[in-house]
Image (spheres, rainbow, N blue to C red):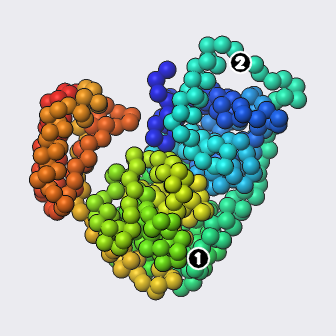
Amino acid sequence: MGRLFGTDGVRGKANADLTPELALAIAVAAAHTLAESDRSHAPLAVVGRDPRASGEMLEAAVVAGLASAGANVLRVGVLPTPGVAFLVGETKADLGVMLSASHNPMPDNGIKLFAAGGHKLPDEVEMRIEAAIEANAATAWDRPTGAGIGRVHDLLDGADHYVQHLVGSVPHRLDGLKVVVDCANGAAADIAPVAYKEAGAEVIAIHAEPDGLNINDGCGSTHLDVIRAAVVEHGAHLGLAHDGDADRCHAVTADGEEVDGDQIMAILALAMREAGTLTDDTLVATVMSNLGLRLAMSREGIRLVETRVGDRYVLEELRASGLALGGEQSGHIIVPAYATTGDGVLTGLHLMSRMAATGRSLADLASVVTKLPQVLVNVPVGDRTVGATAPAVVAAAERAEAELGETGRVLLRPSGTEPLVRVMVEAASEETAREVAERIAAEVRQASPA
């Protein structure tokens, strides 16, 4: 069996790569692995999903697997990923399962796992789950019978508890703000409009009618053209765009200009420092964040700590160092005081709260970050490691960094799931960034031909 887990759980085309049989096997192995430390009670699992059609099939398989391993199950239905994580903590469950492929198209689906407390799993635990799947396939595992089989119940008020939690976190009400929210025909379709309205905003919801087939279809955080136009058309103060499972948030200004995760993090970091809640005046971001964020935080006296790509690595650093804010350029923003994972609706609430508290426009707040042009070239290779670490490649990257100086940077990163090396270059102009990126990409191709 190859490596199942990627940077955010297990993903693939539903019923082809991610089959009900595999979903059941993952559920059994997760129950054995995440609940093995305490056998004094039957383990409890929370299971949620986004609205894509295949989620119904995979949910049935996951629930069957968990119950067959002796775990009791609370089904919470369609709910954002951070909502499932929240309810794992609220119900004191031993584990949680979210069925979603995030921003991926409808034919895909995925399985995200949470440990007790609603935290994503470290690599070591994922490897133990993969080992358990192999062991269970090779040798019949002890199945409970009779009263030992898990029971299944629906948690009917889970969404209400989650919305109350979100609205209760807002430091300043949103009265007077008009927002367009693109729900991506996904898990935020019911949650986001309600949360924003209860916090005081006037809400215009678009792409909020999921039918199981239209999730992420030309909408949401990866397709901003529609919300740009809608914000201008409705004269809204801003727009917020979520992805299929609502763990990320992108914004657009009243003029329809994009505000990405880096800019949102900067806005929230300054707000939290002013409120005295930004621990050690430190922000956590990944190596993919724009150099403009680094320069802005340095200018503002805020320390920036970098991690690997993936919001779980941001969270690991936040937890290990006791820090209060982190996230990714992609719009995964984590505020550990209120969430154990990226939460798009929470992010939208706190972003609007800053606007309401200061009376400043989103464009004005976002201007703290001047983004440098960023070019990303994905280079197909025969060997990812060789392509990224060959001496000629490393030498080319070092020469480029010396050439760019403080006005740019180079990042070489092997893909975690594909035979690619990602060459990212930032520079004072897009022309310079592209020329440098293509020069390094040529060395990568020569070092490890596809």
What is the number of the mark on residue 303? none
SS at badge 2: loop
Question: With 430 as the anchor, is 219 left or right in this view?
Answer: right
Q: Do the residues labelled 1 and 2 touch (CB within 8 Å)?
A: no
Residue 96 position, x and y percent, is 66, 43
Residue 125 visible in rendering: yes
Q: Which amino acid does label 1 sit on?
A: Pro
Residue 15 visible in rendering: no
Q: How many marks?
A: 2
Quadrant in which residue 254 is drawn:
bottom left
SS at badge 1: loop
Disc 1 target residue: 171
Q: Which of 57 and 272 is in front in this view?
A: 272
Q: Nearer the viewer, residue 422 or 278?
A: 278
Q: Nearer the viewer, residue 430 or 190?
A: 430
Q: In this view, does 131 lie above or below 404?
A: above
Q: Quadrant of the C terminus?
A: top left
Residue occupying image coordinates x 53% and y 39%:
122
Residue 116 position, x and y percent, is 67, 45
Residue occupying image coordinates x 69% and y 59%:
159
Residue 86 position, x and y percent, is 65, 55
Mark 1 Cα-neighbour bin, 10 Å: few <14, some 14–19, many ≥20: few
What is the number of the mark on residue 141? 2
| Alpha-carbon span between mark 1 and mark 2 | 50 Å
Residue 232 position, x and y percent, is 38, 77
Residue occupying image coordinates x 57% and y 59%:
336
